Amino acid sequence: MFYGKNSFDIIVVGGGHAGVEAAYASAKMGRNVLLLTYDVGNLGETSCNPAIGGIGKSNLVKEIDALGGLMGRLSDLSGIQYRVLNSSRGYAVRATRIQIDRKIYKQKTLSILLNIKNICVYSCEVTELIIKNNTVLGVIVNNNDKIFSSITILATGTFLDAKIYISKFYSYGGRINDFCSRNLACFLKHLCPDYGYLKTGTPPRIDSTTVNTKKLFTQESAFLKSGFFSVFRDLYNYNFLPQVKCYLTNTNSVTHKIILDNIHKSALFNDLLKSVGPRYCLSLEDKILKFSSKLEHQIFLELESLSNTVIYPNGLSMSLPIEIQKNVIHSICGMEKAKIICPGYAIKYLFFNPNNLYRTLESKKINNLFFAGQINGTTGYEEAAAQGLVAGINASLKFNFKGKIFNHLKFKRNNSYIGVLIDDLCHKSIEEPYRIFTSRAEYRLFLREDNADYRLTPLGYKLGLISEKKWIFFNKKMDYIKCAYNYFKNKKISKKKIFFLKNIRNKEISIKKLISDYFIEIEKIKFYFKLNKKIESNPYLKEVEILIKYENYLKKQKKEIKKFDIYKNIKIPKNINFSKISGLSKEVIENLNKYKPSCLRQLYKITGITPAAIIIILIFLQKFK
Ligand code: FAD
């Protein structure tokens, strides 16, 4: 009996980023939820780098937040270093990245979930599912207790049949010093035989008191200059945390020699080799082998928590023997005397082919069973959280309840990165751990970080995930934006306004500067009457500026998309040599040669083929005739 019950609406297995969002969304939508995980103290654990966001990933976090999910809020609550990536480039590829305090992130996750009446959280191992007539009826836990539920969501991350490797030695666990889910893995392999193994790795952790930071470049937090993740942050009582510096150093020829001399001792050279790792998150061994002409690789030293001295050396993932890891660390500037607190390691784990899922993330084979997170072959906290939210929403929608407006919800490629992620997972083959990128989204100019709430908050409200308080806040914001936008766009176009709009479209000039330089007092007063606020103090001027800047690009993108629709049946000649097409990445060429698509439409189904690559191929084909 769990909390006096042995039956729930929804059971979520796993308290990682996917499980947390799934449980939270289901509970907010009124379902009775039981979240089972090995250790409740580790809810929302960041197994590898202590940071949320980054290119493409930050769009997912903003979308989760816009829909009423948790990850954005948790990151804001625990952020200790803020950055804007790609700040000199357009808004469509700009990204927020927040280095978080790992401990606080976990504490906040636990306290939020414990404060929701209809979620029960419990530490235990799920060993089997109860299945009858191709329908899941609940789970069996390690003391053989049966717990029943209408729906079960599996969010077991890297824990299924997981092996941790340091050189030729291995142990079982989904993270170092953690459990391995072997019984459930064995059960699921029989139930769903379409599975595979993937790998990833993590760097050794260092004691910050043993690093000579005086020798290193520092990077200050861009706190306040960068955006936060949650658009609703003004509604919460936030005590922002003290900000920390991050330190930069590099590998060098000595480091590379140590790696090359000992490469045969790396775990990469035992049976790990048989599985594939994330292409964009390479181990140091891989980087040095693959990019042999590079003389150095940059390392970021990031503090894991304000309450301890653990440093995460971003870029130093390795699985060499511990003695060699020590030598590698000591060869790097600033870390000559650094002490390793925890060794780096590689991990190999089981995943299930997500092509066997509907876009709701429900299994096509077993009714009422959902899969979310790294179990589906993805990598990354944000990708996992987004899937958790999708599974949680769709699991809840399977129930009949008052106010229900949909039977299921399928996110689309043109309304969200969540839609791109789910569509790719369900339709493309998983050749390597799947990571989101802006280049995967053909509608990326529409799917910016800054407009996630315009796109998705109304949907979150309809689903019951956005509270009345948030809804009122959102509508007020939209009124401000509409009013300011209409002021510039819809009124009689004066010569001055034409000049003004032209300048805003020039990306170097900000709307605030133009107003202060060109608006005469009378215009400011007019605006005041419309908005009941001085124009300069409209908190959303930046967003109005982005809307104006993007108008023309969006029109162009719409045209390109239409053009692609016309061309998608174009045949691709058999004798085409894809390596000859300049501008394609190595990954794209590899996959084209492997799958040999016969028409443009098929390109979409191939892993790694981005919309940008499709345009390049289209142009090449037109010349090839
Ligand atoms: P997880 O965070 O793995 O959570 C799974 C949860 O399920 C855990 O709470 C576990 O206790 C629970 N669980 C599992 N089985 C059971 C069971 N049978 N019964 C009860 N509870 C169970 N991502 C990156 O983007 N970049 C990286 O560089 C990177 N490096 C990584 C390095 C390592 C060593 C590891 C382990 C992971 C790394 N990741 C990296 C992946 C990242 O940790 C995951 O993408 C993310 O945590 C996945 O979230 P999730 O919710 O799917 O699963």
Image (cartoon, rainbow, N blue to C red):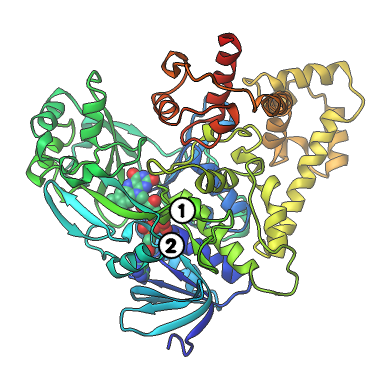
**Ligand 1 within 8 Å, label 1 CB:** yes
The picture quadrant where one finds residue 35 is bottom left
How far across and down, in percent of the image, does residue 152 sit?
A: 49, 70
Residue depicted at 23% across the width and 57% down the height: 176
Expressed as whole percent of the image width and height from the top left, the position of residue 84 reads 49, 35
Cα distance, mark 1 to mark 2?
Answer: 8 Å
Please state which of residues 114 and 399 is positioned toward the viewer in this rendering: 399
Residue 609 as seen in the image, left or right of residue 252: right
Q: What residue type is labelled 2?
A: Ala
Left or right side of 144 for 222: right
Q: In which quarter of the image is residue 147?
A: bottom left
Asked if labels 2 and 1 touch by Cβ distance under 8 angstroms, the answer is: yes
Lateral position of residue 164 relative to residue 222, left or right: left
Is residue 509 positioned above or below 222 on the image? above
Instruction: Report the disc number at residue 621.
Output: none
- Disc 2 C-beta below 8 A from ligand 1: yes
Residue 41 seen from this side: no
* Quadrant location of the N terminus in the rendered image: bottom left
Per the image, label 1 sits on a secondary structure element best described as: helix
Does residue 529 appear left or right of residue 282 in this picture? right
Q: Is mark 2 on a helix, strand or loop?
A: loop
- Read off the residue under disc 1: 384
* x 80%, y 46%: residue: 479
Q: Earlier in the sequence, mark 1 or mark 2?
A: 2
Q: Which residue in the structure is indicated by mark 2?
A: 155
Which quadrant is home to the C terminus?
A: top right
The image quadrant in which ligand 1 is located: bottom left
What amino acid type is highlighted by mark number 1?
Ala
Could you classify mark 1 by the number of other residues whose Cα lies within 10 Å: few (under 14), some (14-19), or many (20 or more)? many
Q: Measuring 79% from the left and 16% from the top, which residue is drawn there?
A: 499
Q: Where is residue 547 in the image (x, y as percent from the top left)?
A: 72, 32
